[in-house]
Image (cartoon, helix red, strand yellow):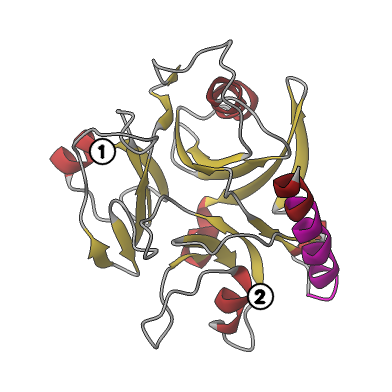
């Protein structure tokens, strides 16, 4: 109960702050799919250069929240949306591959392990490469070694070549607020989504595959999932974050 109250309070305060900020319409929208509510932020190919990945500020300290990200922007830039973008250690460093503006800060991890990240297959979201957007299974990513302007690794994969992750159970009782990213088959569209309420992996994967038409999709995280979307009067508060992805105009 205490956790629910803290989350509700954070959402309420975030909404008040978001209402005072310039809104960028037409990117994020509320959607219903199979009885669940989501927010989906959609980027087309021509918007790819505006997609950014943040971790540390100029002083080398982790940014950790959306307000700190906004402070990194120039006076003519607006943050249209942002969300947490992959799992991280206690010191906020990425668990897997992290590339921002072509500079790699952490290596790819292909070994399995505990937790959601180690639930193979996991994968990498890559933008600014041969296609505007790609979600690639981690071992395939290592073999192909694609060029990415930004890249973040997380896990598990939600959708792999049109199929849900083989370990997802339709009757699972594991439910969390979850967020992730999916990519259209031609790589021209990326969908960043977060659930309104706690959902299973199976439900979240189906949103991308059946609701959005993604051939490949990647889980970013659950329970700590946060969204900044001023057009929806939303600026989530909560635990400090590691990697943050967002779109600037």
The structure residue drawn at horizontal position 24% and vertical position 65%, both measured from the top left corner, is: 104
SS assignment at label 1: helix
Task: Return the x and y of residue 121 as percentages of the image width and height.
Answer: 30, 28
- Residue 218: give x, y in percent of width and height: 44, 37
- The crowd level at tag 1 (other Cα within 10 Å; few <14, some 14-19, many 20+) is many
Instruction: Write the residue at 74% across / 48% down.
Output: 2
Which residue does the numbered mark 1 point to in the structure image? 138
Residue 135 lies in magenta, yes or no? Answer: no
Residue under the image location 53 percent in, 57 percent down: 46
Secondary structure beneath dot 2 equals loop
Return the residue at label 2: 78
Quick check: 233 above or below 152? below
- Foreground: 232 or 6? 6
Q: Residue, x 61% and y 22% (percent of image)?
A: 203
Residue 99 position (above or below residue 41): below
- Which residue occupies the extreme left position in the image? 143
Write the start and end of the magenta stretch as one range: 7-21
């Amino acid at each position: 109960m205490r956790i629910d109250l803290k989350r509700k309070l954070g959402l309420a305060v975030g909404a008040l702050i978001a209402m005072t900020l310039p809104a960028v319409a037409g990117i994020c929208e509320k959607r219903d799919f199979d009885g669940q509510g989501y927010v989906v932020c959609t980027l087309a190919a021509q918007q790819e250069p505006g997609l950014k990945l943040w971790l540390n500020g100029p002083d080398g300290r982790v940014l950790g929240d959306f307000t700190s990200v906004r402070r990194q922007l120039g006076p003519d830039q607006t943050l249209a949306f942002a969300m947490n973008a992959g799992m991280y250690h206690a010191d906020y460093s990425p668990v897997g591959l992290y590339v921002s503006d072509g500079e790699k800060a952490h290596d790819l991890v292909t070994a399995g392990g505990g937790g959601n990240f180690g639930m193979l297959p996991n994968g990498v979201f890559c933008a600014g490469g041969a296609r505007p957007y790609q979600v690639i299974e981690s071992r395939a990513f290592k073999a192909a070694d694609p060029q990415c302007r930004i890249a973040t690794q997380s896990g598990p994969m939600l959708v792999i070549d049109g199929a849900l992750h083989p370990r997802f159970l339709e009757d699972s009782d594991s439910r969390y607020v979850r967020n992730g990213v999916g990519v259209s088959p031609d790589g021209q569209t990326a969908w960043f989504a977060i659930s309104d309420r706690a959902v299973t992996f199976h439900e979240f994967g189906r949103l991308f595959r059946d609701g959005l038409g993604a051939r490949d999709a990647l889980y970013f995280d659950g329970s700590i999932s946060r969204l900044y979307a001023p057009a929806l009067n939303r600026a989530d508060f909560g635990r400090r974050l590691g990697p943050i992805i967002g779109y600037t105009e």
